[in-house]
Image (cartoon, rainbow, N blue to C red):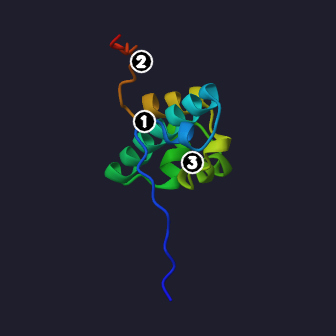
Amino acid sequence: MKQKIAQKIVKGNIFDALGFDSEEALDLKLRSDLLLIVNKIISRKKYSSRQLQQMLSEDQARISELLNGKLDKLSLSRLVRYVAKLGQPVEIRERRRIVAA
């Protein structure tokens, strides 16, 4: 017997939909976006763990956390530094939402 799985399409920040407060949801969203960027660079350039240790000035444990997606161990500022050290320009922009009355 097949079990039906409820599906819900979420627009916007998934962490909001999961019930995190707005500040924590934003922090998680930013960190997850940066982690995806870092992992794409690593995959594209085929960096080894040893190369990452040298490039990012981190020990093996921290590189392992990065490669295994341990988001709770990676701060926003650390991920921004990683992106910059991997040669990707970092730019923070404000987006304004226009709400119709």
Tell me which numbered mark, 1 or 2, is placed earlier along the sequence: 1
Q: Name the residue under label 2.
A: 92
Dot 3 and dot 2 residues touching (CB under 8 Å): no
Mark 1 residue element: loop
Tell me which numbered mark, 3 or 1, is placed earlier along the sequence: 1
The mark closer to the camera, 3 or 1, is 1
Q: Quadrant of residue 100?
A: top left
Q: Name the residue under label 1.
A: 12
Q: How crowded is mark 3: few (under 14 residues within 10 Å), some or many (20 or more)?
A: some
Q: Residues within 10 Å of mark 2 (few under 14, many from 20)?
A: few
Tell me which numbered mark, 3 or 2, is placed earlier along the sequence: 3
Q: Residue at x 51, y 79 (%)?
A: 3
| Foreground pick, 23 / 64 | 23
* Residue 12, image x, y percentages: 42, 35
Q: Is residue 30 above or below residue 72?
A: above
- Amino acid of disc 1: Gly
* Residue 24, image x, y percentages: 63, 31
Spatial CA span between label 3 and label 2: 22 Å
Q: Residue furthest top?
A: 101
Mark 2 residue element: loop
Spatial CA span between label 1 and label 2: 19 Å
- Amino acid of disc 3: Leu
Query: In the visual, does 47 lie left or right of 31?
Result: left
Q: Residue furthest front?
A: 101
Mark 3 residue element: helix
- Amino acid of disc 2: Ile
Q: Name the residue under label 3.
A: 66
The mark closer to the camera, 1 or 2, is 1
| Quadrant of the drawing holding the C terminus | top left
* Residue 53, image x, y percentages: 56, 45
